[in-house]
Image: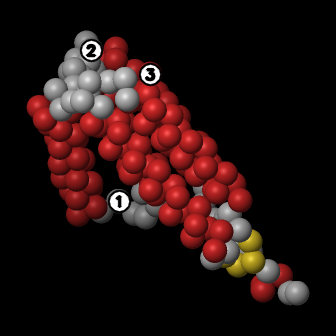
Amino acid sequence: MPAAEQVKRDVPGIVISAIVFGIGVLVLVEAQEFSPMGSIFPRTVAAIMMVFCAAYMIVAWRRPQPAGVGEQGSSLRRVGLFAVMLLWSIAFSTVGFLTTSVIAYAAITLLATYGRWTASRVASRLVAGIAILALFYLLFKVALHVPLPSGWLL
């Protein structure tokens, strides 16, 4: 069979999805010990996470892609995304939720933008960032009453 006709299943993606699905199961089990109000968020996130993982595993197994599809991309950007998220999760309790979230959003935006920066692109990213961060802050602080760390900045 010629190389152009060979198909490949995303086995690493399926394995990672299975692991994340298992983490979702663990979260559901652990959330049983929480108060009814305290368990809403982790149970909801775990259920959504499990649905998307199951859907990906089914699609990846049933519809293999031609060899070479999906193998483009920058490993440096992927490592950068992981590093930003790791640093955010470590620093937000000390520095503050809003401050670290703004810095992480800016860093991820820089990592994820491939094309030229234009005024409209900067403006749209800025508006989207403000809206997303405000929404999450209000969701956690006001709606769910999650005590967000204020840290030494915000």
From the viewer's perspective, is residue 47 above or below residue 7?
Answer: above
Mark with earlier residue (3, 2):
3
* x and y percentages locating residue 47 in the rendered image: 39, 48
- Quarter location, residue 62: bottom right
Which kind of residue does numbered mark 2 sit on? Gly
Q: Can residue 153 be seen in this view?
A: no
Residue placed under numbered mark 1 in the picture? 117
Give the label on residue 90, or none.
3
C-alpha gap between disc 1 and disc 3: 30 Å
The secondary element bearing badge 3 is classed as helix
Above or below, 116 relative to 37: below
User: Residue at the spot x=83%, y=82% of the render?
Assistant: 3
Q: Which amino acid type corresponds to the residue marked 1 in the rendered image? A: Trp
* CB contact under 8 Å: marks 1 and 3: no
Left/right of residue 72 with respect to residue 85 in the rendered view? right
53 or 136, nearer to the observer: 53
Q: What residue would you read off at disc 2?
A: 151
Q: Which of marks 1 and 3 is in front?
A: 3
- Say which of 136 and 46 sits in front: 46
- Distance from disc 3 to disc 2, alpha carbons, whole Å, reads 12 Å
